[in-house]
Amino acid sequence: MGLATEDVERLDEIVKRTRPLHRGDYLFRESDPFRSLYVVKTGSVKTFAPSSEGGEQVLGFHLPGELIGLDAIDRDRHACSAKVLETSAICELPFSRLEELTAMTPSLQHQMYRLLSKEIAQDTDMLLLLGKKNAEERLATFLLSLSQRLRKRGLSPSDFHLSMSRHEIGNYLGLAVETISRLFTRFQEDGLMCVDRKHIQLLNLAALESLVGSCSQNRRQQQT
Amino acid sequence: MGLATEDVERLDEIVKRTRPLHRGDYLFRESDPFRSLYVVKTGSVKTFAPSSEGGEQVLGFHLPGELIGLDAIDRDRHACSAKVLETSAICELPFSRLEELTAMTPSLQHQMYRLLSKEIAQDTDMLLLLGKKNAEERLATFLLSLSQRLRKRGLSPSDFHLSMSRHEIGNYLGLAVETISRLFTRFQEDGLMCVDRKHIQLLNLAALESLVGSCSQNRRQQQT
DNA sequence: AGGAATTGTTGATCCAGATCAAACGGCAGC
DNA sequence: GCTGCCGTTTGATCTGGATCAACAATTCCT
């Protein structure tokens, strides 16, 4: 992510590599004391918070290269749980070590601020999604987000495996499972994608992008 | 916020105090280059991002003591606009100066990480609100949040002025203006609060808190 | 392999909250 | 004081997506 090799070496020294984790394993649970940040090397992880009365809100899906646990620094304990969705390799970054390191390395400190800030900006996008977008726009946004993040890691942006269930996607997007299922069917009928169980192929990225930007053509105006 | 007086003095040296700003003034606009963070001293500010096709999503209301602009560090330009809601005193913190200062002051660096992390945790709460709560729960959550933040600053937690319009509240909470208006009326009928134009009195904090936690009594189960 | 539990799909119905419509109350400008 | 414009309230109606209800396809377990 644009670090000098010198910095990378230093970071490398404090990273702990954990043995592979498997579907269902927890990286940490809500209210665990906060000690480390985690980086997904391969596989995927979901984070989620308990909502009132037993339910849960999926907060995010984390793909290779992505950092988990930034929301816990403030309270010294995790505010959400992180569960592995498929066999995954995860690196652990003890935060106190990281903090010492960034204190003596301005370029790393800057990088750290950027990472935290990026997380905020992403949450902000999500607020817009949940606050203003309809079901179709939400799912299109989700698919394109996955696509872009996979591309960034050199993986196929148009042919991939969903490690999360329809239920989890719906929860994340603020929609019911049934709505997700119906939209997958519809998107497929419209030739936007090809869905086979958890195997997804995006056939028309451009069309999906035009859905994301709020389908102005088929709605009257817009509130607010 | 729990800083050593020594640190506060150093911070004080880099703070720019701006003349009072007035309703409608912008602190910054979306896509402006990022230079500074802002702290509300008195008054209030709203931040908002353009949503697709002209609308906007209100991202937050910022009261005295709160920091604005953290989402811009990553991209070097502001991802949202900040508009003053009433005559306000705002401090400006040039970020490059702040970054230098925190690099040489571990306690300040730590504080900075905590602030960024807290922002993420707050956004997370908001995702839960927009993803899982109904209209009643959203408004109750909003009112209690204001109440608590005012109390933290030594202001009345149960008698205050709303500097934002019903429209802005609705936008923030993902609800229509009419819904906000109706809920205010209902909350008042139920003796939870007293509403007079923009003047709010919370009469029953405990009851509002019980609303927030999802009113399990009057709904069947709960999805996920 | 066989049965049970989980996950996904599809159709029918329902409802919270949006949208539409109208009238009202404050307040700014003249 | 009068006028016009917002912002707010209230009522009527509409609708996107939730909920309910089967059922089908997978995966898991023994």
Image (spheres, coloured by chain):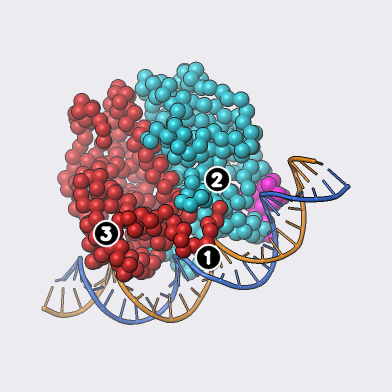
Chain colours: A red, B cyan, C orange, D blue
**Residue B107, horizontal then vertical, whole percent:** 40, 24
Q: Chain of mark 2?
A: B
Q: Amino acid at mark 2?
A: Ser
Identify the residue at image location x=56%, y=38%.
B83
Element class at badge 3: strand
Q: Chain of mark 1?
A: B
**Residue A49, horizontal then vertical, whole percent:** 39, 51
Element class at badge 1: helix
Q: Are marks 1 and 2 on the same chain?
A: yes
Sequence-earlier tag: 1 or 2: 2
Q: Is residue D17 left or right of residue D8?
A: left
The residue where tag 1 is placed is B217
Residue A202 image label: 3
Whole-number angstrom distance, CA of label 1 to CA of label 2: 23 Å
Q: Amino acid at mark 1?
A: Gln
Identify the residue at image location x=50%, y=17%.
B13
Q: Nearer the viewer, residue B133 or A192?
A: A192
Instruction: Residue B191: tell me if it is visible.
Output: no
Q: Is residue A29 left or right of residue B159?
A: left
Residue B145 image label: 2
Q: Specify whether residue B191 is painted magenta.
A: yes
Identify the residue at image location x=46%, y=20%.
B7
Residue B87 image label: none
Q: Chain of mark 3?
A: A
Q: Specify whether residue A12 is painted magenta.
A: no
**Magenta stretch bounds:** B187-207
- Number of other residues with Cα within 10 Å of mark 3, as a class: few under 14, some 14 to 19, many 20 or more: many
* For discs 1 and 2, the disc positioned in front in the rendered view: 2
* For discs 3 and 2, the disc positioned in front in the rendered view: 3
Whole-number angstrom distance, CA of label 3 to CA of label 2: 42 Å
Q: Nearer the viewer, residue A52 or B125?
A: B125
